[in-house]
Image: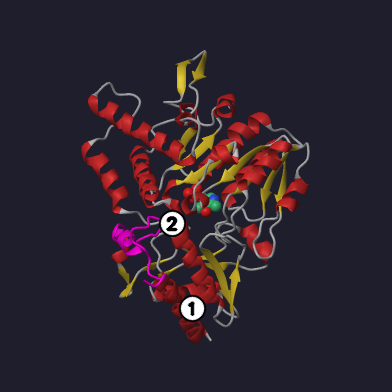
């Protein structure tokens, strides 16, 4: 048997056609053409396992959590807490109490900036981010800086999108109190060596947070191995529902932090002479949480875990390599972000063509890409571009779809020439 034929018995090979059948939306057509969905970096599509879990919850087992003294409330609370437990195992947290449900990863960053930043950082202390951060990992720190006089420092990236650990290390000093860096760039696909970042941050006496919005989708994350103090991600990019994010924090740090939002569910006792708060995670979950969404995230994590990151990574690496090869061979196409070992997030420009025009032609071919600054304006400035077209791949994309992307770019060149 030629070695190009995948061995179906080998669990490290992804059966992409079987995977695609799990995602109902992938059989849709747009403008009479098959949908080629390459905007999963903005939000991923959902497998029917996630849709069914959420539907099942709403049809058969739904109530508010942590309060009612009745069957449905107990059952829903159980399912909700099992979702927390599943997330804890997914990240290898030491205990589910380290898992806080938030509305999205943006809220996770804001929670840390408010509850940790305002309590423990003071004027002159330094927070280090990188040039390739999403606005969600810039603006909360700028707001903290305005409120407290904390100083923001920025670790540079190379022209090819690589993160230079030595240049990052040079920024650290005894004023550095917090490092908050993306684990994987949503524009460039660059993977940041999180464990090394954490080691250096800790050696400088700083706490470290990672924005894992992209990283958890493309590879396994072990917060204890990394030794992250905080780690955030967002469910909707991990094939789960929108409206839910996760903040992991080390338990002793979380319990040392004051609450961020106040209200129901987060208190121990309330009176007009003062209130006391629960411990983590509930201290940071004021109000009714995203119940159905948490159950959906549980199903999404099970889905990804069943396929296995070995298979997912091998498949996505082949998509990335094929995309770099095909797009790189098109005259005038410039790939933005070619760091070694990057994720299958392909940003590019076509010489002489506005990225919005290119994306519009791709769209008419059924190829859905994102275009613009990707919520990373400082990175666009650093790279000297107004924006990029971004084809962000997921476990359900195929080599044939990458070929369709390349063909659509050729068409855009002809039409817009
Ligand atoms: C998408 C994304 C975010 C923001 O996610 P939300 O769900 O909108 O909060 C933050 N960081 C990175 C790296 C992202 O890709």
The disc label shown at residue 312, or none: 2
Quadrant in which residue 367 is drawn: bottom left
Location of residue 100 in the rendering, given as x and y in whole percent from the top left corner: 47, 34
Q: Which residue is mark 1?
A: 409
For the N terminus, the image quarter is bottom left
Instruction: Specify how the rendered protein is coloured.
Output: secondary structure
Which is more N-terminal, label 2 or label 1?
Answer: 2
Circle 2 packing at 10 Å, graded few (<14), some (14-19), many (20+), is: many
Which residues lie in the magenta part? 1-24
* Pick the front one: 85 or 116: 85
Q: Residue furthest left?
A: 60
Element at label 2 = helix
Above or below, 53 against 122 in this view is below
Q: Main secondary structure of the magenta part?
A: loop
In x, y percent, where is residue 201?
A: 69, 40
Between the C-alphas of marks 1 and 2, the distance is 26 Å
Rendered location of residue 35, percent (x, y): 35, 69
In the drawing, does residue 87 fall left or right of residue 389? left
């Amino acid at each position: 048997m030629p070695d190009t034929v995948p061995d179906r018995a080998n669990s490290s090979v992804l059966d992409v056609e079987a995977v695609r059948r799990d995602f109902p939306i992938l059989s849709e057509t747009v403008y009479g053409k098959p949908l080629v969905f390459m905007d999963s970096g903005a939000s991923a599509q959902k497998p029917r396992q996630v849709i069914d879990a959420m539907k099942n919850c709403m049809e058969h087992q739904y109530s508010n959590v942590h309060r009612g003294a009745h069957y449905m409330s107990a059952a829903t609370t159980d399912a909700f807490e099992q979702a927390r437990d599943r997330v804890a195992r997914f990240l290898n947290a030491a205990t589910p109490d380290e898992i806080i449900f938030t509305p999205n990863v943006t809220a996770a960053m804001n929670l840390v900036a408010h509850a940790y930043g305002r309590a423990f950082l003071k004027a002159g202390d330094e927070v280090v981010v990188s040039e390739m951060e999403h606005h969600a990992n810039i603006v909360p720190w700028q707001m903290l800086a305005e409120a407290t006089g904390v100083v923001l420092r920025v670790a540079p990236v190379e022209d090819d999108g690589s993160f230079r650990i030595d240049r990052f290390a040079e920024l650290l000093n005894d004023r550095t109190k917090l490092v908050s860096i993306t684990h994987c760039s949503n524009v460039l696909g660059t993977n940041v060596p999180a464990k090394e970042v954490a080691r250096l941050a800790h050696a400088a006496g700083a706490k470290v947070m990672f924005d894992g919005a992209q990283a958890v989708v493309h590879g396994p994350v072990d917060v204890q191995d990394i030794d992250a103090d905080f780690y955030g991600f967002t469910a909707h990019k991990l094939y789960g529902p929108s409206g839910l994010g996760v903040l992991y924090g080390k338990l002793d740090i979380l319990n040392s932090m004051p609450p961020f939002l106040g209200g129901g569910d987060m208190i121990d006792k309330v009176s007009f002479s003062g209130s006391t708060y629960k411990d983590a995670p509930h201290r940071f979950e004021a109000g009714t949480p995203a119940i159905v969404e948490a159950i959906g995230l549980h199903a999404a994590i099970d889905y990804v875990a069943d396929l296995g990151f070995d298979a997912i990574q091998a498949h996505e690496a082949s998509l990335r390599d094929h995309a770099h090869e095909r797009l790189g061979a098109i005259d005038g196409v410039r790939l933005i972000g070619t760091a070694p070992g990057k994720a299958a997030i392909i940003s590019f420009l076509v010489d002489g063509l506005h990225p919005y025009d290119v994306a519009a032609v791709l769209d008419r071919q059924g190829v859905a890409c994102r275009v613009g600054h990707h919520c990373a304006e400082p990175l666009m400035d650093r790279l000297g571009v107004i924006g990029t077209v971004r084809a962000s791949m997921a476990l359900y994309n195929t080599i044939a779809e990458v070929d369709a992307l390349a063909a659509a770019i050729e068409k855009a060149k002809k039409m817009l020439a």
